[in-house]
Image (cartoon, helix red, strand yellow):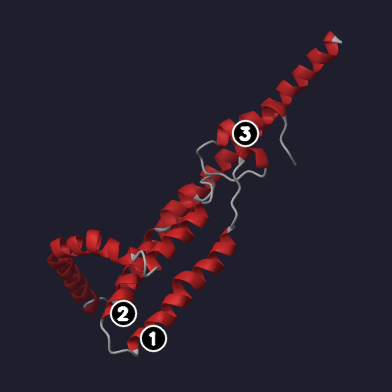
Amino acid sequence: MRCQGSICMDLRNLFHGVGTRLPDRRLHPLKMILGSWSYVLLSTALALLYPTYCSLKALRTPKKEDDVQWLTYWVVYAIFRTVEFAPDLVLSAWCPLYYELKLGLLFWLISPYFEGASVIYIKYLDPWLEKNEAQVDSMIGEAKAKLKTLRSEDLAKYGAMAYTAVAGAQKQVSKAAETVTEKAKEVVAEGAKKDGEETAETDKDK
């Protein structure tokens, strides 16, 4: 179903910047070349299978350089996978060529020509670790000490807290989705009413 007239314009105004996918091609003139499933397949081959094979080969060689290269990559890739959900939620719905840009970033990290992973490690991660290493080690030590004294009652307590937090977040998301749906219905109804009035005026003029 294609929106027409003022309905399409009102829907564009409503969802602009919200990151909501709408089926009308005119709302997204720059279409993605890759979809999410295509990205999953390509990124798995590029960022997991190929580096894994190269890492296995590096383990069989006496050289240290290739070990450092791929260990650095896996550290940076782990951080990438940890934080990528945030831009995925915000940008994937409306940023043109978003998945293509992510593949380009992964290629930059892997490429022996660009050595993107080494650049990120040397410029950002190593200085951060040097500054915060003692604090991080202290936090890890405290966590290990607490785990040693953890009881089954504590696990049940933390599990209940986690379930409550997830359930609350799910309710908020559902409520927000219902609100957006209701606003969309109102916009469609107003647009249909405007189109009807315009059609009536046109017929009247004739």
Secondary structure under badge 3? helix
The residue shown at (71%, 27%) is: 5
3 vs 1, front mark: 1
Q: Which residue is mark 2?
A: 66
Describe residue 71's horizontal placement relative to residue 49 as left or right: left
Nearer to the camera, 3 or 173? 3
Q: How many angstroms separate mark 2 from mark 1 (CA)? A: 9 Å
- Name the residue: 75% across, 42% down: 1
Three-letter code, disc 3:
Leu
Q: Are marks 3 and 1 in contact (CB under 8 Å)?
A: no
The alpha-carbon separation of the residues under discs 3 and 1 comes to 54 Å
Q: Are marks 2 and 1 in contact (CB under 8 Å)?
A: yes
Residue 145 at what x, y percent from top left? 18, 75
Mark 2 and mark 1 lie on one chain; the one further toward the N terminus is 1
Residue 128, quarter of picture: bottom left
Quick check: 133 left or right of 42?
A: left
Q: Which residue is identified by label 3?
A: 11
The reply, left or right, for residue 18 in relation to residue 200 is: left
Q: Position of residue 154 (x, y in %)?
A: 30, 71
Residue 18 appears at what percent x and percent y? 51, 40
